[in-house]
Amino acid sequence: MTEAPKKTSTPTRWTKETLRDPHHRADKARRVEAMFDAIAPTYERVNTVVSFGRDAAWRHVTVAAGDVRETDVVLDVACGTGDMLRTFAAAQPPPARLIGVDFSARMLALGQYDDVATPIHLLRADAQRLPLADESVDIISCAFGVRNFQNLQAGLDEMGRVARPGGRVLILEFSTPSNPLIGWAHRLYVQRVLPVLGTLISRDKTGAYKYLPRSVATFESRDTFLRRLNDAGFSNITVRSMNLGGVILYRGEKRRSGGTL
Ligand SMILES: C[S@@+](CC[C@H](N)C(=O)[O-])C[C@H]1O[C@@H](n2cnc3c(N)ncnc32)[C@H](O)[C@@H]1O
């Protein structure tokens, strides 16, 4: 008699237990990479649906905040399938060169750049060890990426290392609205509706759309994040709230030697 094949569960699946404290798990990076590899084919579609198409506007605001010049080299850290890179390429004027870094091979492979005229280089690498020279880029963006880093400070320090003095850093992330009523409605949507919608569309088995609200709710405070950006070498930091406080854009400038801009 042949044995029925054992039902294997996804080893990197987010569970109630692993979601208790996702940012402090030693295997966070491995889980995050496997999760994005799994959801890559439907990643952009889910974003459009669950954000009601608003994510495009958040990206445009981010690119506008970069004050792109035609000589600029732009690095998009955790570029995924390239939404930010394409938005930078559409800037007026467009930058001279685009570099995208991500550690998910499948997210990188599924990026569409047919309409991008700006030279673009995609690198598979960890944001905590960027394969780029010191002070070699003018603008660094990272949209919905930093929350996923294993070691947040190491990732921000790398951005500080590769940014040219005076260069701009643009970090787009989800946040929690401070208004109690909006916060209640927001929680209801991101914790109850979004996971169901995201999982249905993507047919995800990794728990990605449960990780999303949990990783936002347990991410560090705005003040701690601002201190980290400062420690990574950025000054003149401004914060812009969007989507009634559900999305936040940090913009900073790399300090020139001597500590001031
Ligand atoms: C939510 S997606 C964002 C993708 C893209 N920035 C966007 O706005 O659509 C997060 C991306 O970060 C990547 N990522 C997370 N941690 C990373 C790390 N340590 N190094 C490189 N990429 C990382 C994931 O593979 C994934 O593609």
Image (tube, rainbow, N blue to C red):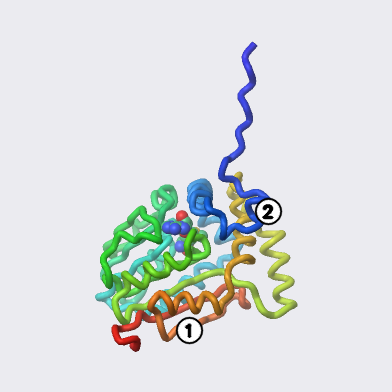
**Which of the two discs, 2 and 1, sits closer to the camera?**
1
Left or right: 98 in relation to 62: left
Q: Earlier in the sequence, mark 2 or mark 1?
A: 2
Residue at the outermost top position: 1
Image location of residue 213, percent across then percent down? 63, 62
Q: Residue at x 63, y 18 (%)?
A: 3
Instruction: Check disc 1 and report the residue beneath it.
Output: 238
Amino acid of disc 2: Val
The quarter holding residue 211 reads bottom right
Left or right: 138 in relation to 15: left
Image location of residue 76, percent across then percent down? 38, 65
| Quarter occupied by the N terminus | top right
Residue 183's place in the image compared with 12, above or below, is below
Q: Residue at x 73, y 71 (%)?
A: 185
For label 1, the SS is: strand
Separation (CA) of disc 2 from disc 1: 34 Å
